[in-house]
Amino acid sequence: MAFFEYLLQVPANRWGYGTLSAYQLKILQECITLTVFIAFAALYLGEGINLRYGISFALVLAAVGVAFYK
């Protein structure tokens, strides 16, 4: 599971270094982590997303939007 997350995070940090702040990179990293975990939980563990988890993920996505809003 960590391998797929790593494949997304390392290029994101390399591309973002210098143009994004450390805060923006960290929030983006958390979003990537949750996205990979949701896919893992759904596909491998067979767990679905209920309303509470869906709202929680939407709030994390909203945090990404706020962090990148100019």
Image (tube, grey):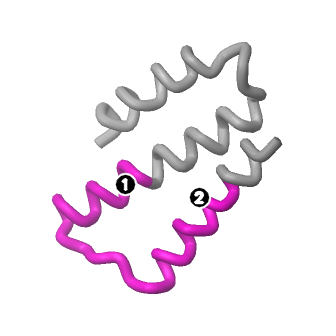
Outermost residue on the bottom side: it is 51
Secondary structure under badge 2?
helix
Q: Position of residue 12 (x, y in %)?
A: 52, 25
State the count of labels.
2
Q: Main secondary structure of the magenta part?
A: helix
User: Residue beneath label 1, please?
Assistant: 37
**27 or 44: nearer the viewer:** 27
Q: Nearer the viewer, mark 1 or mark 2?
A: 2
Residue type at mark 1 is Phe
Q: Position of residue 11 (x, y in %)?
A: 46, 20
Is residue 51 placed above or below 42 in the rendered structure?
A: below
Instruction: Identify the mark at residue 1; answer none if there is no mark.
Output: none
Q: Position of residue 43 (x, y in %)?
A: 18, 61
Does the magenta run of residues contain 51?
yes
Q: How crowded is the residue under tag 1: few (<14 C-alpha within 10 Å), some, or many (20+)?
A: some
| Quadrant in which the C terminus appears | top right
Where residue 62 sits, quadrant-wise, is bottom right
| Quadrant in which the N terminus appears | top left
In the image, the segment drawn in magenta is 35-63
Q: Residue at x 72, y 26 (%)?
A: 20
Left or right: residue 67 versus residue 31 is right
Q: How crowded is the residue under tag 2: few (<14 C-alpha within 10 Å), some, or many (20+)?
A: some
User: Residue beneath label 2, please?
Assistant: 61
Secondary structure under badge 1?
helix
Does the magenta run of residues contain 68?
no
Task: Decide which of tag 1 and tag 2 comes sooner along the chain.
Answer: 1
Residue type at mark 2 is Leu
Q: Residue at x 66, y 16 (%)?
A: 17
Q: Position of residue 40 (x, y in %)?
A: 27, 55
Is residue 19 placed above or below 4 in the rendered structure?
A: above
